[in-house]
Image (cartoon, rainbow, N blue to C red):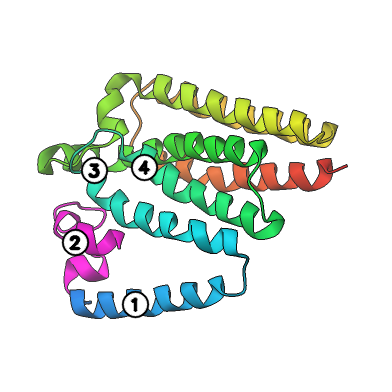
Amino acid sequence: MNDLADRSFDREVQRTQHRPLASGQLTPSQAVAFLGVLLGFAAFLLWFLNSLTLLLSPVALLLAWGYPFCKRFIHVPQLVLGLAFGWGGVLAWAAVRNELDQSTWILFAATVCWAMVYDTIYAIQDKDDDQRIGVKSTALLFGSFTWLGVGIAGLGMLGCLALVAKINHLGIAYSVTLMGVAVILGYQVLLLRSKISGEKAFSLFKQHTWIGVLILGGILMGLP
């Protein structure tokens, strides 16, 4: 859905001009057909889950569909991306526990903040092209204060994850891994205080894989 909506923009951006839809290797009708197959598989899988998850699932589709268009109208499309990705956590919680409690929404907020961090960094790669073609992003909105925006979002993420730990009585191992996450985020914020290249921004973006590994490992080790 994202590549379908952005194919005209992608042709104008150096980093994305060779994507299948942008380059013409894939036609829109072929992409729509493939999207239909993927949505069909997703709908099929839903029937194995509880009714609460089924009820919540259209929101995920709506967010995924709406995200690509947000960058045309609002300066914080990364926030909508966070909502779309974070809703996957809500669905997973509902699928496993058949309920939504306080921790669900705190984790959802943490995921939204996290997306604001890594996708703002990711958007640094395309700042010049985005500005030229009229695509909006938090990297453009924050400008020279990108480090501050990323830092605030990172603090929000860490705060939410710490609160979830307190509510669910996660052990010391989780707290230690969360400190590791804080060190990585702090390092990135310091680097962002100076102008960085697109290549460096992508390198920082990829470090968030390890942030995810740390969080998952901390949860698994910290469970009572």
Q: Choose mark 1 or mark 2, whichever is in front.
A: 1
Task: Name the residue type under label 3.
Answer: Lys
Residue 90, given in percent of the width and then of the height, sits at 57, 49
Q: Is mark 4 on a helix, strand or loop?
A: helix
Tell me the tag on residue 36: 1
Question: Disc 3 versus disc 1: distance between alpha carbons?
Answer: 24 Å
Determine whether, in the image, residue 140 is placed left or right of residue 101: left
Q: Which residue is drawn at 69% across and 58% down?
A: 96
Q: Mark 3 points at which residue?
A: 71
Three-letter code for the amino acid on which mark 4 is drawn = Val
Residue 83 position by quadrant: top left
Q: Which residue is drawn at 47% across and 78% down?
A: 41
From the viewer's side, name the closer residue of 169 and 147: 169
Q: In which quarter of the image is the N terminus?
A: bottom left
Check disc 2 and give the amino acid type: Arg
Q: Residue 7 carries which label?
A: 2
Frontmost of labels 4 and 2 is 4
Report which quarter residue 191 is drawn in: top left
In this view, the mark in front (3 or 1): 1
Instruction: Specify the segment rendered in magenta.
Output: 1-25
Q: Which of marks 3 and 4 is nearer the N terminus?
A: 3
Q: Which of the two residues, 116 or 15, is positioned nearer the viewer here?
A: 116
Q: How far apart are marks 4 and 1 (CA)?
A: 23 Å
Residue at 19%, 65% (x, y): give it.
22
Disc nearest the viewer among 3 and 2: 3
Residue 139 place in picture, x, y as percent = 30, 32
